[in-house]
Every structure is written in structure tokens, then in C-alpha cells.
């Protein structure tokens, strides 16, 4: 009998979070704050991993803890306190939070076409191939998936233009 | 449809910085002369931003779920309890 392999992110989380929580506690932070910064760091880690831009010099845990520390300091609005070790320069959190207008525009796009947003997310955020997208969304091949992706993008662009006109 | 699709792909490549310097310069010159294209570029830039916001929102939900699962493991929960006594 084979056991189902655990998601590597779950193992990394289990192994790293207590160490990070301990550091945040020493600096006077709460568990909730530690979790938020740790999740910011994991999002950055996963995005870099998916785009092949993750450069781990020592171990995934060390990289994650370094990034989480930067996120924590960033959340305190103090900026990096110490010179960053090589390899962490590119791990600065970027626009993790967006403004309310963008959030409300996203919610409106999800209400009017969740499937389109899922498809666009699969392509632009998850970096799935057109073949994968065709399989996942039930299209007849990559060409058909590419046409549907374009139609979704066009729909989203039109909604954005309309929203921006009304916001002016 | 093909030309519109190709145009959207070109805008993607511009926004994702996949064009060569020369191609990007030519594209930007085109933007100055074509207001409709410039509008599409701005809307597509915002679309990229919103898709990333959506991706991150879903990623955070998945991480919250992992956290909840780990809290059900005695050793993990105990470690956190010890840290934040």
C-alpha cells in the first residue's frame, strides 16, 4: 500500500512556522501577526517557485524565514533593519495589499464571470500551459483554449474600462 | 479574431517585459499615435493586477486552510501554545 505524499508546502509550513512565530514573539508580536507575515512570505515563495525565479542558496526553510522576517518588518512600517543576506534582495514584498477600489472591481468581475477569472488566473498566475487549461476547462485543444482566454481577457478589459469611466 | 488575439498577446508581452528594447520602443511609439491601443494597454495592465490579486487571495485561503489543519496536530499546536503563553 502506498501512502499519499504530503504537499511539500505543508511540511515546509510545519517545519518553519514555529521558528518564525518564536522570533515574532521575541519582538513583541502576536500569533496572528506572525501568521499574516508568514503567509505573505509563502505567497512570494510560491509565486517565485512557479515562475522559476526562486533562488534558494541554503534551504527552503532559511529562505522562507528570511523572507518572512522582511515581511514582518515591512508590516511594522520600519523597513529592513539589518543588511539583507545575499539572495534576499529580490524577496521584498511587493504590493501585497491593494486598495479598496481594486478589491471591489475584482469582486464585481468575480460576480459577473467567475469561470473567466479562473481561466485567466490559470494562465497568468498559475502559469499553466494552454494544453493544461484546455484539459482543465474542457476545451477542444490549445487553440480553442487560447481563443477563450482572449475572449475572457477582452470581457475583463471592457468591464475595467466601464468601471473606470464611472469612477471618473 | 486572429488579429485581435495577436494584439492582446503583443500587449501581454509588452506588459510582461518580454519584448526586446527595440520592440518595446516601437510599441511605445505606436501607443502615442493610437489612443484606442493605449486604452487597451491600460485596461490589460489593470487586468493583470486584478488577476494577481485574485491569485493571491486564493493562495492565502489555501494557506489559512493548511494552518487550520496543522493546528489539529498536537505537536504543532503545543509548540505555538508554548511560544505564546
Image (tube, helix red, strand yellow):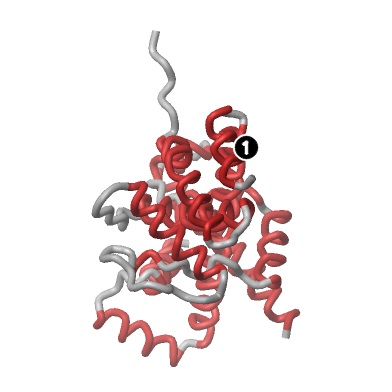
**Direction top: furthest residue:** A1
Residue B5 lies, with reference to residue B68, above or below; the image says: below
- Identify which residue is drawn at 64% across, 45% down: B85
Residue nearest the viewer, comparing A41 with B34:
A41
Q: Residues within 10 Å of mark 1 (few under 14, many from 20)?
A: few
**What residue do we see at 25% from left, 76% from top?**
B20
Quick check: B1 above or below B76?
below
Residue B75 location, x and y as percent? 53, 30
* Residue B40 point in image, percent of width and height: 53, 76
In front of the other: A85 or B57: A85
Left or right of A127: which side holds B85? Answer: right
Residue occupying the point 42% across, 50% down: A46
Where the C terminus of chain A falls, by quadrant?
bottom right
Mark 1 element type: helix
Q: Is residue A123 above or below residue A91?
A: above
Q: Is residue A160 visible?
A: yes
Q: Residue at x 41, y 47 (%)?
A: A128
- Can you identify the residue that label 1 sits on? B68
x, y percentage for residue A157?
Answer: 59, 68
**Which is more toward the observer, A110 or B69?**
B69
| Nearer-the-camera pick, A158 or B76 | B76
Amino acid at each position: 500500500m502506498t501512502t499519499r505524499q504530503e504537499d511539500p508546502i505543508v511540511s515546509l509550513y510545519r517545519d518553519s512556522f514555529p521558528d518564525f512565530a518564536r522570533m515574532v514573539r521575541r519582538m513583541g508580536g502576536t500569533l496572528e501577526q506572525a501568521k499574516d507575515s508568514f503567509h505573505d512570505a509563502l505567497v512570494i515563495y510560491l509565486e517565485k517557485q512557479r515562475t522559476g525565479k526562486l533562488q534558494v542558496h541554503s534551504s527552503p526553510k532559511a529562505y522562507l524565514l528570511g523572507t518572512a522576517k522582511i515581511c514582518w518588518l515591512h508590516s511594522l512600517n520600519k523597513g529592513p533593519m539589518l543588511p539583507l543576506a545575499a539572495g534576499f534582495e529580490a524577496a521584498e514584498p511587493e504590493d501585497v495589499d491593494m486598495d479598496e477600489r481594486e478589491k471591489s472591481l475584482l469582486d464585481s468581475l468575480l460576480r459577473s464571470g467567475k469561470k473567466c477569472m479562473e481561466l485567466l488566473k490559470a494562465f497568468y498566475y498559475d502559469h499553466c500551459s494552454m494544453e493544461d487549461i484546455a484539459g482543465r476547462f474542457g476545451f477542444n485543444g490549445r487553440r480553442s483554449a487560447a481563443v477563450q482566454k482572449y475572449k475572457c481577457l477582452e470581457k475583463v478589459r471592457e468591464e475595467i474600462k466601464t468601471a473606470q469611466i464611472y469612477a471618473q | 479574431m486572429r488579429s485581435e488575439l495577436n494584439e492582446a498577446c503583443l500587449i501581454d508581452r509588452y506588459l510582461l517585459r518580454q519584448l526586446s528594447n527595440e520592440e518595446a520602443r516601437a510599441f511605445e511609439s505606436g501607443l502615442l499615435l493610437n489612443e484606442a491601443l493605449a486604452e487597451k494597454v491600460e485596461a490589460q495592465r489593470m487586468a493583470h493586477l486584478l488577476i494577481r490579486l485574485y491569485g493571491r487571495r486564493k493562495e492565502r485561503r489555501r494557506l489559512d486552510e493548511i494552518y487550520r489543519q496543522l493546528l489539529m496536530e498536537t505537536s504543532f499546536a503545543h509548540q505555538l501554545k508554548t511560544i505564546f503563553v
